[in-house]
Image: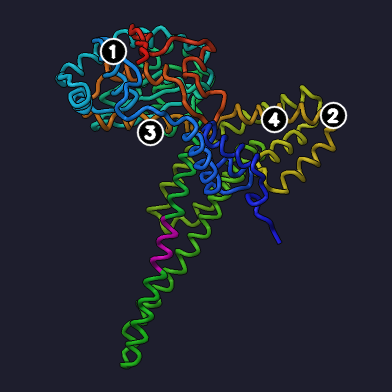
Amino acid sequence: MATCTASCLDAESRKHLALEVLARKEPVIRIAERNDVSRKFLYHQAAKADSALNKVFESKAGADDVLFYLPVTKSWLWQFVLALILICRSSIRGVVELLRDLFQVRISVGTVHNITRTCVEKARTINLAQDLSSIQEGTHDELFQAGKPVLVGADLRSTYCYLLALEDHRDADSWGVHLLDLKEQGLHPERIIADAGKGLRAGQALAWSDVACHGDVFHGLRELGQLTSYLEHRAVGATSARETLERKMNRARKKSKGNTLSKKLALARADESKFIQLSKDVSTLTQWMQKDILCLAGPDFSTRKELYSFVIAQLTLIEPLCEYRIRPVRRSLENQQNDLLAFAKLLDVKLLEISKRFHVCPEVVRELAQAKGIHDTSSLRWERETQVHRKLKDSFHAVEQAVLQALADTPRASSLIENLNSRLRNYFSLRKLIGSDYLDLLRFFLNHRTFMRSEHPERVGKSPVELLTGQKHLHWLQLLGFTPCCRQAA
């Protein structure tokens, strides 16, 4: 009988897990997977540890006792206003209300607006002075605010946002002008990852004709996933319609009127059969694309290209059965084939370089890379790694580290820019009207604030600028000319 892992843990192990959750250095789901326990169990242990810590450090001071004094100056109020807007994402009227209710300070909406504007020039100067020559891989995207496009660009490694601009159009000229301006700051990456936006790609071609623009695998797979979901829903709907007609047919037969529904029922059965089969076929093709063709640790470029072409051919065959849904997806995938597979060609070069560096067979290096793509809880992964280990012997660990680094350094999707966009929307939702001034200040703040938590431990406690340059910098408020206030003991 299988034994629950959680029930076998001793007190010391439970305490260690609780501290890991409270430290928030990585998502709880990863801690749960690594230790083979449930998230519910981890949250329960963390709650017990948190309760114990609260009891130990519980303040003996009463609710009305003075803990410390803080000299509230005009400069401090300005810092507080900026922190509310940028850290807390507060609305301007929310800032006015908070100062009125908690500090008995009455300021106008215009004053809050003016406080932010006074910092814009310093923020813009710092943004323009940043050297971008170390950026090797970037990602671009567009999001919309009040019907107008906001052009966004960021470094894939450091998450530094080097472009945040509101424009009237998202055409090639708009993108090209901004990219040429960034070129003067030293930005000339080796490659860019972006979706299939025509203006975005045309603008990059105008500004950086020698920079490759790889396709974003996420968008390609999402289109296939949405098609699969649609066909599954149509299949369920067709089954429901057929069952309804069959019930009506049974009632009609009792009245000797079954022939009135026979044609409708035959059509419903044919419709059900069609969409069930379509759903299965497209689901299979989607799985191939996701797990074999566009996965990171997969076959070589030429094999992927053949498989990709096969998927397109199969979609072409079934296209007449649901043309208005399948055709746009098929055409999109067909047009993006080279862009979406560009990462595979890059990975082939890296794996070949590893085989030459360590004087091992390229097929063995590829085999090890494919093994790394299998989930670490699967026995198949360890079996395949063991086979590679026997072939490489003493050089296995060195080759393994090189392969892992190659996989980590080969991005396929613009997930980072999507994450940045999700954070930007929280700010945009509070501002009906945004302009270059606000965006310059926001970009400065996002680049100079430190990460409190991250899936990558090396990023915790560092800002995107620090990750980009490798050098520490002052707090973002100090960079804007403010002096931190020191609290005084009661």
Disc 3 residue type (three-letter): Ser
Disc 2 residue type (three-letter): Asp
Q: Quadrant of residue 84?
A: top left
* Disc sitting over residue 76 in the figure: 1
* Disc sitting over residue 422 in the figure: 3
* Disc sitting over residue 403 in the figure: 4
Precedes in sequence: disc 2 or disc 1: 1
Secondary structure found at label 3: helix
Precedes in sequence: disc 2 or disc 3: 2
Disc 1 residue type (three-letter): Trp
- Vertical arrangement, residue 133 with respect to residue 144, above or below: above
> Answer yes or no: do the residues labelled 2 and 3 have beta carbons within 8 Å?
no
Precedes in sequence: disc 1 or disc 4: 1
> Could you give the CA–CA distance between mark 4 and mark 3, rounded to whole angstroms?
32 Å
> Could you give the CA–CA distance between mark 2 and mark 4, rounded to whole angstroms?
16 Å
Q: Quadrant of residue 482?
A: top left
Nearer to us: label 1 or label 3: 1
> Image check: 57 left or right of 34?
left
Q: Overall secondary structure of the magenta stretch?
A: helix
